[in-house]
Amino acid sequence: MRPATPTAAPVQIPGSSASPVLGPASVLQSAAWQEFQGSLDRTAHRLGGTGWQALVVEEHTAVGPLWYAPYGPVVETPAVLPEALASLQEAARDHGISWLRVEPQCPPRIGASFSDTVRRQNATAASLAAGLRSLGAQPAPRDIQPAFTRWVDLTRSPEEILKAMTGTNRNLWRRHRDKGITLASSHRVEAAEEVVELLHRTAGRNGFTAQSGDYLRTAARSLGPTENCTAYTSTVDGTVVSALLTYDSPTTRIFAHSGMDAGARKLRPNQPLIAQALLDAAAQGQSVADLFGIAPPNDPDHPWTGFSAFKRSFGGADVALGGTWDVPVSLPRYGAYRVLRTARDTASTARARARSAVQERKRTTRGGAEPQG
């Protein structure tokens, strides 16, 4: 299986001689990502100044447009954040933008030890959050990109990467051929179709909202030829039973989308597939794998708790990314948005409770309660 070779230029901070940055900003703030957004007919702008840069994607709401910076702006130090936000607000006013939606990052750079990388990331995430509050930003109604994630160190040898996993995951990778599982990777659009199919079946089964098939196909068409997008598949007897899609920069591999055939659950095809994608990323010189989203620490009731434990079984460390924040540009329009959003969320909650009550009445009428005593 041929590993990917990312070719997009790494994210560099203007006015700095620093090395390329690590983390999801290196992918979602890249030139390749900007081209991908253009393929989706979205307007994207790149702005920057001394010590910072940002790729912003224009989105539209009922009360006006906003600029969204996925894991951006990228700032050299937290001290640069006020200047970066002020410059972005000024540019946004010139374009008639109602508010900014930001996820600022002060990412570590390649060359530091993994423990130092994680320590710096967690420290700067807290510092940036404090800076955002002091500048009048407020948490967005929901996080767009994950606020917490799991990073895996890819600078180690293959043996060390495998050793950091649980024994179960390690053995599933070593014995996948014995179970008749074939692993493959491809940058072709056709391979992404397998991800689309299994992702949407998994979403329907587990009750989450997946990215649309058109979005994922466009990602494969736009990012695949530059090898910034890789589809991985596990196949048994000619049938794809699990699949995942990664987004790649020269420093970082993001495990973005995945799905599995429920009928293959006993084979556990996901584990060897993820392990192989980790080993491939290390072989091609990437430094960090981002397993992309875990539950917040110390929140055992969070709906992501189950798959967070699964992601932690591949080793690595928990990392804070700061969450999504709104920075008003037009206070009246942003205020109107929050009022409309609150009303929509309240109505949605009421509908969900009503559906739950109806289902409970049906279950009780059928005698569905478990016998007691």
Image (cartoon, rainbow, N blue to C red):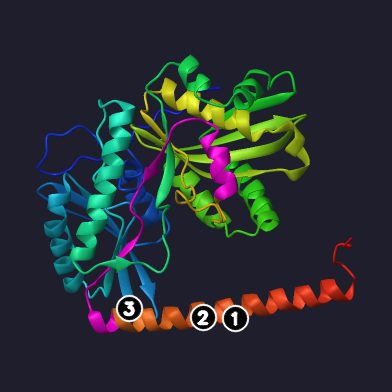
Separation (CA) of disc 2 from disc 3:
22 Å
Q: Nearer the viewer, residue 100 or 128?
A: 128
Q: Nearer the viewer, residue 200 or 351?
A: 351
Q: Are marks 2 and 1 in contact (CB under 8 Å)?
A: yes
First in residue order: circle 3 vs circle 1: 3
> Local crowd at mark 1 within 10 Å, few (<14), some, or many (≥20)?
few
Q: x, y percentage for residue 93?
A: 18, 73
In the depicted structure, whether residue 81 falls above or below residue 230 = below
> Local crowd at mark 2 within 10 Å, few (<14), some, or many (≥20)?
few
Asked if residue 365 is among those painted magenta in the image, a careful observer would answer no
> Local crowd at mark 3 within 10 Å, few (<14), some, or many (≥20)?
some
SS class, disc 1: helix
Question: Taking the image as drawn, is residue 311 in sight?
Answer: yes
Magenta-highlighted residues: 305-333
The residue indicated by pointer 1 is: 350
First in residue order: circle 2 vs circle 3: 3
Q: Are marks 2 and 3 in contact (CB under 8 Å)?
A: no
Question: Residue 9: which quarter of the image?
Answer: top left
- In the displayed structure, does residue 369 sit left or right of residue 206? right
Q: x, y percentage for residue 43?
A: 32, 62
Q: Nearer the viewer, residue 43 or 363?
A: 363
Asked if residue 330 is among those painted magenta in the image, a careful observer would answer yes
Q: Residue at x 44, y 80 (%)?
A: 342
Q: Tag on residue 64?
A: 3
Q: Quadrant of the C terminus?
A: bottom right
Q: Amino acid at mark 2?
A: Thr
The residue indicated by pointer 2 is: 346
